[in-house]
């Protein structure tokens, strides 16, 4: 069972068979935190360790912003206007709203 609180700040993982619990904090962030971009670089999602995101589109550096949560390989977005969206991470690629975003180092 996984429970993510404030994406990347505290991640508790319980494994029933092993009975172990692991904590990940801002000093050891979630592996999906960082910048994700479309192949052409036009759409950019910055997933921040504080559970906030900023989506840039073209020259608009903050076209959308809000909060997100990650559960396993699934991400849920809620922008500051209340609009919701989601996506999935598959083999190091983020699939979101018909877009394909790649991790930018």
Image: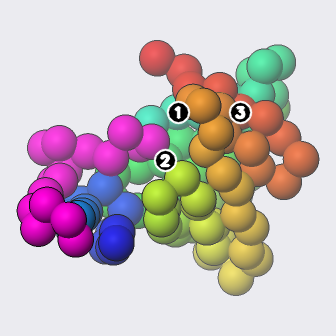
- Label 1 – label 3 distance at C-alpha: 9 Å
Q: Is residue 34 magenta?
A: no
Q: Nearer the viewer, mark 1 or mark 3?
A: 3
Percent position of residue 44, x then y:
67, 35
Please tell me which of labels 1 and 3 falls first in the chain: 1
Task: Say few, some or many: other residues with alpha carbon within 10 Å of mark 1 (under 14 / 14 to 19 / 20 or more).
Answer: some
**What residue does disc 2 label?**
47
Q: Quadrant of residue 15?
A: bottom left
Residue furthest bottom as drawn: 82
**What residue does disc 1 label?**
35
Q: Residue at x 82, y 18 (%)?
A: 40
Q: Residue at x 74, y 44 (%)?
A: 95
Please tell me which of labels 1 and 2 falls first in the chain: 1
Q: Is residue 63 above or below residue 81?
A: above
- Label 1 – label 2 distance at C-alpha: 6 Å
User: Which region shows up in magenta?
Assistant: 16-33
Q: Is residue 69 above or below residue 74?
A: below
**Most common secondary structure along the magenta stretch:** loop
Residue furthest right as drawn: 98
| Label at residue 101 | 3
Colour approach in the figure: rainbow
- Horizontally, residue 76 falls left or right of residue 68, namely right
Q: How many marks?
A: 3
Percent position of residue 25, x then y:
16, 54
In front here: 61 or 26?
26
């Amino acid at each position: 069972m996984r429970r993510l609180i404030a994406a990347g700040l505290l991640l508790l993982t319980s494994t029933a068979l092993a009975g172990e619990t692991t904590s990940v904090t801002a000093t050891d962030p979630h592996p999906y935190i960082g910048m994700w971009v479309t192949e052409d670089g036009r759409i950019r999602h910055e997933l921040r360790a504080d559970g906030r995101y900023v989506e840039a589109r073209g020259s608009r550096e903050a076209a959308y912003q809000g909060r997100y949560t990650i559960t396993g390989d699934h991400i849920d977005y809620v922008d500051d206007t209340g609009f919701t969206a989601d996506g999935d991470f598959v083999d190091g690629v983020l699939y979101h709203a018909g877009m394909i975003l790649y991790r930018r180092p």
